[in-house]
Image (spheres, rainbow, N blue to C red):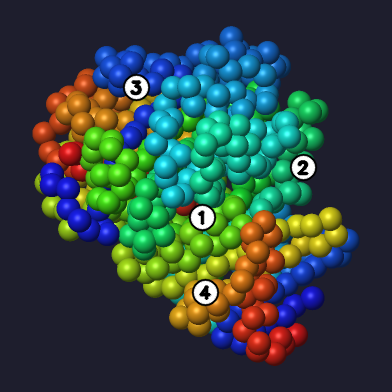
Amino acid sequence: MLECVPGLGVAVSVPRVEPIPKSAFVLKDKRFDPLVGVTLHALETFAARVAPTTPRTAHIALTDRGCTAHLNRVFDSVRAQRPRQAFFARASNTMLASYPAMAVQSHGPCFALSGSTDALRLAFASATALTQTRNCDCIVLIAADDDNTTHRASVIAVTERSRRLYKASSLPDGLPPVDLLNLILLDSKEPLLS
Amino acid sequence: MNVRNSSHDYYVLHADALTCLGHGDALFNALNMGRSGLSVASDVFDHPAIDEHGGHVGILPQVTGEDRLGQIFELAFATIIPSALWSCDLIIGACSVGDLVGDDAGNPRAALSRSLSRHCPPTRLVPPHVVVSSACSSGTDAVSLAAQALSTGLASAVGILAFDSLGAGKLMQHVALGTQSRDRARPFDTSRSGTSFGEACACKILANSYAATRLKLPIMGRVVGYGASADAHDVTAPNPHGTYVAEALQRACIGVEPGNIGYINAHGSGTRLNDLAETKAIELAFSSEAKKIPVSSTKGALGHTLGATGLVEAVVTMNALKRSELPPVYGLVTPDPDITLNLLRVASPSTKPYAASVTLGFGGVNSAILLEAA
């Protein structure tokens, strides 16, 4: 399912039993975690329908558990004492920001944060500081997590509008960041377009 | 350095690291005496894939088994983490993947939360805490994020805890990836063949002038600037031209004359690709001054401590400035002629007020910070 708030952001969810939608990004390395695949799908829609990214965009990923599919393979490999190095190299949370940067060929800062509302708060503060210090010229927040049945990813542009919505939102602590971003999208009271 | 009342002052009140070479003065003395804390991997781990190919590792000798982060935090709270941590408004953790077994496998924030709850005094509350993950740049990014939290007024004092563990399972993955040297990390050496992974925990406290007074800790120095960039090139290999690492360095050093930078703690992982790319980056960033600035990497002595490495090296850099003594490159026997940097072969006096620390992470994440002595 894909929902878009024009000028603000995109929310995507894909049942885990379904194939991950392919994006048109040209990536030489496609061995990413399925959650990264869903993130790229969300990012592609974001770039087409919300705001194009620039070569100096910062990608800040927010996640609770990260790339669980790859991590589970790594855990299995440790138990079996047989390395699965391709999954290991692509299992860390940062891949949720690095692959988007590679996909859009953007060279701004990229990193991942975990920590529910505290992480979101720090992400918005970081966005302010990174812009002021000219480390980037725009910032995209990417929240992604799997639950038992679904891969979910949301992408939001950090703008005056999203900051206003964030400040006005009552965001309960403890929720995965993707739920927090979706609450911001819902609070926009704009119609969600599919 | 005067203590100014400014929201753009990021004072370093505490900087220490628990490593295979110890912590505190013992660590910095050993580094400057040219010692290494690395061990032969097959002496430490009993694993068929590690026997022949494991090289050297920088593990904490008191830590056993595969479920390691809890033990590492126990040691860290007993040695390098001051009680002032509980007076911070925010704690920023930094880690890549963490343990690969146990209740908190692959979930470093859960491991941090558990340890903070365990060690928090009963009269205090655990401060809000997040974890930044940017592979090998996690620790450096944590320092940048702390400065950003201070500059935007999100916090007045930030505790930074970078940590990561190296069990046999994780080492096995790196052996298979080809990043772990079968020998040992020899940064910038002609015969370098990869890095030597390790584990560590590092702690820094950053504060603005108000909190620096409140916490009553002496000021060691200041974070002057930070920079970050992405190569957008490859998942494991750096951009060979060093273009975006140079950008991160330039951003961190804005407003400071290169002639006043007295040291660069390089990522210097000892892989063929990293050391060359980093050399080009330093040359791009500092032009004619690049060949003069003293450079070393401490990975030959401490190992590449994964998500902790950026903060371990920021701690080393801060203490190098404080002690006015710069650590040498351990493991460097024959410098690669293509690496035209001013590599430190022995500990050297520090004569300039500023020093930079730079890290390059998997996924092409580049981060740099600039520090100033008090």
Looking at marks 4 and 1 on the same chain, the residue that comes earlier in the sequence is marked by 1
- Which residue is labeled 2 in the image? A72
**Mark 3 sits on what residue?**
B24
Rendered view: B167 above or below B365:
above
- In the picture, measured across the screen, residue B339 lies left or right of residue B167, that is left
Evaluate whether label 4 is on the same chain as label 3.
no
Q: Residue at x 34, y 45 (%)?
A: B206
Q: Amino acid at mark 4?
A: Lys
Q: Are marks 4 and 1 on the same chain?
A: yes
What is the distance, in whole Å, between disc 1 and disc 3 at their CAs? 29 Å
Task: Tell which residue pokes out farthest to the top in this image.
Answer: B43
Question: Is B117 displayed left or right of B79 in the figure?
Answer: right
Query: Mark 1 belongs to which subunit?
Result: A
Disc assigned to residue A111:
1
Q: Nearer the viewer, mark 4 or mark 1?
A: 4
Closer to us: A35 or A102: A35
Q: Are marks 1 and 3 on the same chain?
A: no
Q: Nearer the viewer, mark 1 or mark 3?
A: 3
How many C-alpha atoms fall within 10 Å of the one at disc 2: few (<14), some, or many (≥20)? some
Residue matched to label 4: A167
C-alpha gap between disc 2 and disc 3: 37 Å
- Is residue B29 visible in the rendered image? The answer is yes
Mark 4 or 2: the one toward you: 4
Secondary structure beneath label 2: helix
